[in-house]
Image (tube, rainbow, N blue to C red):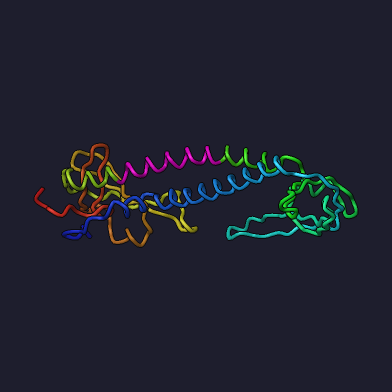
Amino acid sequence: MSDPDRLPPVSMLRLFLKMGGWFVLILGVVLLVLSLIGQSAFNAARRFDAEGLQTVARVTERYTTESTDSDGDSTVTYWLGLDYTTRDGETFDRTRTVTAREYRNVKPGDEIDIWYLESDPEATEITRGSNARGAQAMQVVALVLGAVWLGLLWLVGRWAVEAVRARRFGNCEEAEVTEIFRTSIEVNNRPRYRLKWRDRQGREGQSMLRKHGDLEAWRPGERVRIYQGLKRAWWAGDIGDRRDPSR
């Protein structure tokens, strides 16, 4: 088949999402969550520096829990039960998560030094300065992830702008479909495909990633409409047609 007579123009937001913008948005949410966790650890570190008090805790129990995500990957969480008394004579029996190293270094009945907050005795550090080190590590991760996020945001945003500019101002031409090919990219364990074409000047181009069902109606040799941009051509089936066909 050939392209329909006219296709409604696709908005820049939809183009952004179709070009991988959904991944950029998810990465942005992850970056925000990591930043909030890092800020929380930084605040806790400052509080322990200002009002952390040392005491001795008895390990009452130790155990692990395991969870499995949708991809089948397992995560082990380590737990210690701690019984300790503050300087004011308050006694607490709390179970908290610890690192694998802290878990392996003790057994039930051992006594270990811990630190607690004078204003919140239930908040503890088993390794002095662990909140500060966690905040520093999270800060490094957030900086690296932030740089990656900004780069991807700029790249995908530029693609969307280039596609809209090509649709508005580029030459509209017909090109010949040469093949429908499967890519190495999968989404939700389903492969994605591209439509490939050759224009009158012999230049090749390809569509955005599509499901197989979106492209199965096209065959090699059929004609599709493309819009020539500054660096590449765009298929009308991906970006739609300009509102004024005479331009």
Judged from this view, the residue extending furthest toward the left is 246
**Residue 216: image location, x then y, percent:** 32, 60
30 horizontally vs 168: left or right? right
**Residue 132: image location, x then y, percent:** 67, 40
Q: How many marks?
A: 0
**Residue 82: image location, x then y, percent:** 82, 55
* Quarter of the image where one finds residue 210: bottom left
Q: Is residue 145 magenta?
A: yes
Q: Is residue 156 magenta?
A: yes
Q: Residue at x 58, y 45 (%)?
A: 39
Magenta span dominant secondary structure: helix
Q: Residue at x 32, y 43 (%)?
A: 159
Q: Nearer the viewer, residue 17 or 239?
A: 17
Stretch in magenta: 142-160
158 horizontally vs 23: left or right? left
Q: Nearer the viewer, residue 133 or 212?
A: 133
